[in-house]
Image (spheres, rainbow, N blue to C red):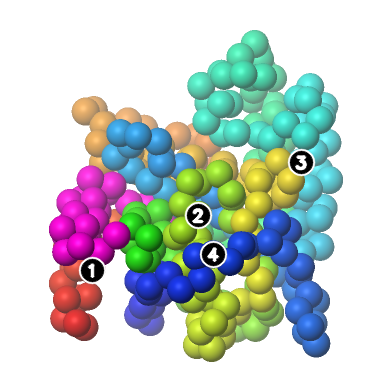
Protein backbone atom coordinates (compact mmCIF):
# COMPACT_ATOMS: atom_id res chain seq x y z
CA UNK A 1 0.00 0.00 0.00
CA UNK A 2 1.31 3.39 -0.94
CA UNK A 3 1.70 5.71 2.02
CA UNK A 4 1.66 9.44 1.26
CA UNK A 5 3.82 11.83 3.23
CA UNK A 6 1.87 14.09 5.57
CA UNK A 7 4.54 16.60 6.56
CA UNK A 8 4.31 18.77 3.45
CA UNK A 9 1.71 21.12 4.82
CA UNK A 10 1.89 24.78 5.87
CA UNK A 11 2.47 25.16 9.58
CA UNK A 12 -0.70 26.73 10.93
CA UNK A 13 -0.18 25.96 14.59
CA UNK A 14 3.45 26.91 15.22
CA UNK A 15 2.50 28.99 18.24
CA UNK A 16 0.77 26.08 19.97
CA UNK A 17 2.91 24.19 22.41
CA UNK A 18 3.07 20.42 22.50
CA UNK A 19 2.44 19.58 26.13
CA UNK A 20 5.08 17.80 28.17
CA UNK A 21 3.82 14.30 28.91
CA UNK A 22 0.54 14.94 27.13
CA UNK A 23 -2.34 13.03 28.66
CA UNK A 24 -2.94 9.54 27.34
CA UNK A 25 -6.65 10.00 27.88
CA UNK A 26 -8.85 12.22 25.78
CA UNK A 27 -12.26 13.52 26.88
CA UNK A 28 -14.71 10.70 26.41
CA UNK A 29 -11.97 8.43 25.10
CA UNK A 30 -10.64 5.07 26.19
CA UNK A 31 -7.28 4.44 27.75
CA UNK A 32 -4.42 4.23 25.25
CA UNK A 33 -3.23 0.67 24.77
CA UNK A 34 -0.20 1.38 22.60
CA UNK A 35 2.64 3.86 22.85
CA UNK A 36 5.20 4.63 20.12
CA UNK A 37 8.50 6.30 20.95
CA UNK A 38 10.89 7.94 18.45
CA UNK A 39 14.34 9.47 18.62
CA UNK A 40 16.89 10.55 16.05
CA UNK A 41 20.60 10.22 15.29
CA UNK A 42 22.83 11.99 12.80
CA UNK A 43 21.47 15.52 13.16
CA UNK A 44 24.89 16.93 14.03
CA UNK A 45 26.63 19.22 11.56
CA UNK A 46 28.38 17.47 8.70
CA UNK A 47 26.49 14.21 9.13
CA UNK A 48 25.77 12.49 5.81
CA UNK A 49 23.09 10.21 7.24
CA UNK A 50 20.13 11.02 9.45
CA UNK A 51 18.01 8.34 11.09
CA UNK A 52 14.72 8.46 12.97
CA UNK A 53 13.72 5.26 14.72
CA UNK A 54 11.69 3.85 17.55
CA UNK A 55 9.42 1.17 18.89
CA UNK A 56 5.75 0.53 19.54
CA UNK A 57 4.54 -1.46 22.51
CA UNK A 58 1.72 -1.89 24.99
CA UNK A 59 1.53 0.76 27.70
CA UNK A 60 1.81 -1.87 30.43
CA UNK A 61 4.93 -3.33 28.82
CA UNK A 62 6.51 0.13 28.56
CA UNK A 63 5.90 0.60 32.29
CA UNK A 64 7.72 -2.66 32.99
CA UNK A 65 10.40 -1.58 30.55
CA UNK A 66 10.96 1.65 32.50
CA UNK A 67 11.33 -0.18 35.81
CA UNK A 68 13.77 -2.74 34.40
CA UNK A 69 15.74 -0.16 32.43
CA UNK A 70 16.15 2.12 35.44
CA UNK A 71 17.29 -0.86 37.51
CA UNK A 72 20.02 -1.80 35.00
CA UNK A 73 21.29 1.78 34.80
CA UNK A 74 21.24 2.09 38.60
CA UNK A 75 23.16 -1.17 39.02
CA UNK A 76 25.69 0.07 36.45
CA UNK A 77 26.31 3.15 38.59
CA UNK A 78 24.80 5.86 36.40
CA UNK A 79 23.59 8.87 38.42
CA UNK A 80 19.86 8.92 39.15
CA UNK A 81 17.96 10.49 36.27
CA UNK A 82 20.91 10.25 33.91
CA UNK A 83 19.72 8.86 30.55
CA UNK A 84 21.51 6.24 28.51
CA UNK A 85 22.87 7.95 25.39
CA UNK A 86 24.03 5.46 22.76
CA UNK A 87 26.46 7.99 21.25
CA UNK A 88 28.15 8.66 24.59
CA UNK A 89 28.23 4.95 25.37
CA UNK A 90 29.76 4.10 21.99
CA UNK A 91 32.43 6.78 22.25
CA UNK A 92 33.19 6.28 25.96
CA UNK A 93 32.19 9.81 26.88
CA UNK A 94 31.04 11.29 30.19
CA UNK A 95 29.84 8.71 32.68
CA UNK A 96 30.92 5.90 30.33
CA UNK A 97 34.54 7.03 30.02
CA UNK A 98 36.04 4.68 32.59
CA UNK A 99 33.80 1.66 32.07
CA UNK A 100 35.63 -1.63 31.54
CA UNK A 101 34.87 -3.67 28.45
CA UNK A 102 33.25 -6.33 30.61
CA UNK A 103 30.91 -3.76 32.17
CA UNK A 104 30.04 -2.35 28.77
CA UNK A 105 29.17 -5.77 27.37
CA UNK A 106 27.09 -6.78 30.39
CA UNK A 107 25.14 -3.52 30.51
CA UNK A 108 24.45 -3.52 26.79
CA UNK A 109 23.34 -7.15 26.89
CA UNK A 110 20.94 -6.40 29.75
CA UNK A 111 19.48 -3.35 27.98
CA UNK A 112 19.02 -5.21 24.71
CA UNK A 113 17.27 -8.00 26.60
CA UNK A 114 14.74 -5.53 28.00
CA UNK A 115 14.03 -4.20 24.51
CA UNK A 116 13.46 -7.72 23.17
CA UNK A 117 11.07 -8.58 26.01
CA UNK A 118 8.99 -5.43 26.11
CA UNK A 119 8.43 -4.00 22.61
CA UNK A 120 6.28 -5.27 19.76
CA UNK A 121 7.88 -3.83 16.64
CA UNK A 122 10.62 -1.42 15.58
CA UNK A 123 10.54 1.24 12.86
CA UNK A 124 13.40 3.11 11.23
CA UNK A 125 13.80 5.59 8.36
CA UNK A 126 17.20 6.91 7.31
CA UNK A 127 18.14 9.60 4.82
CA UNK A 128 21.04 10.65 2.61
CA UNK A 129 21.22 14.17 4.03
CA UNK A 130 23.25 15.72 1.20
CA UNK A 131 20.87 14.40 -1.46
CA UNK A 132 17.83 15.61 0.46
CA UNK A 133 19.29 19.07 0.97
CA UNK A 134 20.30 19.50 -2.67
CA UNK A 135 17.17 18.00 -4.25
CA UNK A 136 14.51 19.24 -1.81
CA UNK A 137 15.64 21.95 0.59
CA UNK A 138 17.59 24.15 -1.80
CA UNK A 139 14.80 24.36 -4.44
CA UNK A 140 12.27 25.12 -1.70
CA UNK A 141 14.37 27.93 -0.27
CA UNK A 142 15.20 29.25 -3.76
CA UNK A 143 11.47 29.57 -4.44
CA UNK A 144 11.19 31.91 -1.48
CA UNK A 145 9.48 29.54 0.95
CA UNK A 146 10.97 30.09 4.43
CA UNK A 147 11.84 27.35 6.87
CA UNK A 148 8.89 28.37 9.06
CA UNK A 149 6.38 27.64 6.27
CA UNK A 150 6.28 23.90 6.82
CA UNK A 151 8.12 20.71 7.71
CA UNK A 152 10.56 20.13 4.86
CA UNK A 153 13.62 18.74 6.65
CA UNK A 154 15.09 15.28 6.22
CA UNK A 155 14.23 14.76 9.89
CA UNK A 156 10.53 15.46 9.41
CA UNK A 157 10.34 13.27 6.31
CA UNK A 158 12.03 10.39 8.17
CA UNK A 159 9.64 10.80 11.11
CA UNK A 160 6.65 10.75 8.76
CA UNK A 161 8.00 7.63 7.07
CA UNK A 162 8.08 5.95 10.49
CA UNK A 163 4.41 6.90 10.93
CA UNK A 164 3.69 5.39 7.53
CA UNK A 165 5.46 2.21 8.58
CA UNK A 166 3.27 2.07 11.69
CA UNK A 167 0.19 2.47 9.50
CA UNK A 168 1.28 -0.38 7.26
CA UNK A 169 2.17 -2.58 10.24
CA UNK A 170 -1.15 -1.87 11.97
CA UNK A 171 -3.11 -2.59 8.78
CA UNK A 172 -1.21 -5.83 8.17
CA UNK A 173 -1.80 -7.16 11.68
CA UNK A 174 -5.26 -5.67 12.16
CA UNK A 175 -4.17 -3.41 15.02
CA UNK A 176 -6.98 -1.04 15.93
CA UNK A 177 -5.71 0.30 19.28
CA UNK A 178 -5.09 4.03 19.47
CA UNK A 179 -1.44 5.06 19.74
CA UNK A 180 0.11 7.69 21.97
CA UNK A 181 3.21 9.04 20.19
CA UNK A 182 6.25 10.26 22.13
CA UNK A 183 9.13 12.05 20.39
CA UNK A 184 12.45 13.16 21.88
CA UNK A 185 12.53 16.90 22.54
CA UNK A 186 16.21 17.50 21.84
CA UNK A 187 16.15 17.10 18.06
CA UNK A 188 16.15 20.85 17.36
CA UNK A 189 13.23 20.51 14.93
CA UNK A 190 10.48 22.07 17.01
CA UNK A 191 8.72 23.74 14.07
CA UNK A 192 8.69 20.48 12.15
CA UNK A 193 7.23 18.64 15.12
CA UNK A 194 4.53 21.28 15.51
CA UNK A 195 3.59 20.86 11.86
CA UNK A 196 3.48 17.06 12.00
CA UNK A 197 1.51 17.19 15.23
CA UNK A 198 -1.01 19.65 13.78
CA UNK A 199 -1.58 17.38 10.79
CA UNK A 200 -2.11 14.33 12.99
CA UNK A 201 -4.39 16.21 15.36
CA UNK A 202 -6.52 18.07 12.83
CA UNK A 203 -6.77 15.64 9.93
CA UNK A 204 -9.56 13.10 10.26
CA UNK A 205 -7.89 10.80 7.75
CA UNK A 206 -4.51 11.04 9.49
CA UNK A 207 -6.00 10.41 12.92
CA UNK A 208 -7.54 7.22 11.57
CA UNK A 209 -4.60 6.03 9.49
CA UNK A 210 -2.00 6.47 12.23
CA UNK A 211 -4.31 5.44 15.10
CA UNK A 212 -3.56 8.81 16.64
CA UNK A 213 -4.40 9.37 20.30
CA UNK A 214 -1.84 11.95 21.40
CA UNK A 215 1.54 13.41 20.43
CA UNK A 216 4.04 14.36 23.12
CA UNK A 217 7.49 15.88 22.83
CA UNK A 218 9.50 14.98 25.91
CA UNK A 219 13.09 14.50 27.08
CA UNK A 220 14.41 10.94 27.28
CA UNK A 221 15.40 11.59 30.90
CA UNK A 222 11.72 11.99 31.76
CA UNK A 223 10.36 9.18 29.59
CA UNK A 224 12.65 6.16 29.65
CA UNK A 225 11.17 4.32 26.62
CA UNK A 226 12.76 7.01 24.44
CA UNK A 227 16.14 5.58 25.42
CA UNK A 228 15.27 2.40 23.54
CA UNK A 229 14.43 4.55 20.52
CA UNK A 230 17.81 6.24 20.95
CA UNK A 231 19.52 2.86 20.68
CA UNK A 232 17.73 1.90 17.47
CA UNK A 233 18.23 5.34 15.92
CA UNK A 234 21.95 5.24 16.64
CA UNK A 235 22.41 1.69 15.35
CA UNK A 236 20.42 2.53 12.20
CA UNK A 237 22.55 5.63 11.65
CA UNK A 238 25.79 3.66 12.06
CA UNK A 239 24.58 0.84 9.80
CA UNK A 240 23.65 3.09 6.87
CA UNK A 241 26.64 5.40 7.30
CA UNK A 242 29.02 2.44 7.18
CA UNK A 243 27.17 0.81 4.29
CA UNK A 244 26.78 3.90 2.11
CA UNK A 245 29.74 6.12 2.93
CA UNK A 246 32.57 4.06 4.37
CA UNK A 247 35.76 3.87 2.32
CA UNK A 248 36.04 0.18 3.06
CA UNK A 249 33.53 -2.58 3.59
CA UNK A 250 32.74 -3.01 7.26
CA UNK A 251 31.06 -5.99 8.91
CA UNK A 252 27.59 -5.45 10.30
CA UNK A 253 27.79 -4.36 13.91
CA UNK A 254 26.94 -7.08 16.43
CA UNK A 255 24.84 -4.56 18.35
CA UNK A 256 22.80 -3.85 15.22
CA UNK A 257 22.21 -7.56 14.67
CA UNK A 258 21.10 -8.04 18.27
CA UNK A 259 18.57 -5.24 18.02
CA UNK A 260 17.44 -6.88 14.79
CA UNK A 261 16.15 -9.80 16.84
CA UNK A 262 13.12 -7.57 17.42
CA UNK A 263 10.92 -7.44 14.28
CA UNK A 264 11.82 -4.13 12.67
CA UNK A 265 10.82 -2.27 9.53
CA UNK A 266 13.60 -0.15 8.05
CA UNK A 267 14.11 2.10 5.04
CA UNK A 268 16.96 4.10 3.54
CA UNK A 269 16.35 6.95 1.12
CA UNK A 270 19.33 7.36 -1.21
CA UNK A 271 19.64 9.87 -4.05
CA UNK A 272 17.65 7.85 -6.65
CA UNK A 273 14.78 7.27 -4.23
CA UNK A 274 14.71 10.95 -3.28
CA UNK A 275 14.61 11.89 -6.98
CA UNK A 276 11.57 9.61 -7.35
CA UNK A 277 9.90 11.34 -4.41
CA UNK A 278 10.55 14.77 -5.92
CA UNK A 279 9.16 13.65 -9.28
CA UNK A 280 6.05 12.16 -7.67
CA UNK A 281 5.42 15.37 -5.76
CA UNK A 282 5.87 17.43 -8.93
CA UNK A 283 3.42 15.19 -10.78
CA UNK A 284 0.84 15.72 -8.03
CA UNK A 285 1.32 19.47 -8.38
Reading the image, the residue beneath label 2 is: 190
Region in magenta: 124-146
Query: Is disc 4 surrounded by few (<14), some (14 to 19) or many (20+) residues within 10 Å?
Result: few
Where 210 sits versus 180, above or below? below
Of marks 4 and 1, the one in the foreground: 4
Reading the image, the residue beneath label 1 is: 277
Q: Is residue 210 magenta?
A: no
Of marks 3 and 2, the one in the foreground: 2
Reading the image, the residue beneath label 3 is: 69
Name the secondary structure under disc 4: loop
User: Main structural element of the magenta stretch: helix, strand or loop?
Assistant: helix
Observer-nearest of 222 and 178: 222
Residue located at (78% from left, 75% from top): 25
Reading the image, the residue beneath label 4 is: 15
- Can I make out residue 166 in this image? no
Residue located at (50% from left, 54% from top): 190
Where 270 sits versus 25, above or below? above
Q: Earlier in the sequence, mark 2 or mark 1?
A: 2
Residue located at (46% from left, 42% from top): 41
Amino acid sequence: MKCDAIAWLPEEHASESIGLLDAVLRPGGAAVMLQACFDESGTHGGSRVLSVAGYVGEKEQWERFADEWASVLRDAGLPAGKPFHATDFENRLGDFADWSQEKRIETQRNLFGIVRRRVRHGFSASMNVDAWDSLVIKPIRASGIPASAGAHSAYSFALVRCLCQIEEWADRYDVSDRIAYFVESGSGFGCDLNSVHATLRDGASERSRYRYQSFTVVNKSDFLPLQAADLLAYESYKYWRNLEFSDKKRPTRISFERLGEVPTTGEFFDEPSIIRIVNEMAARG
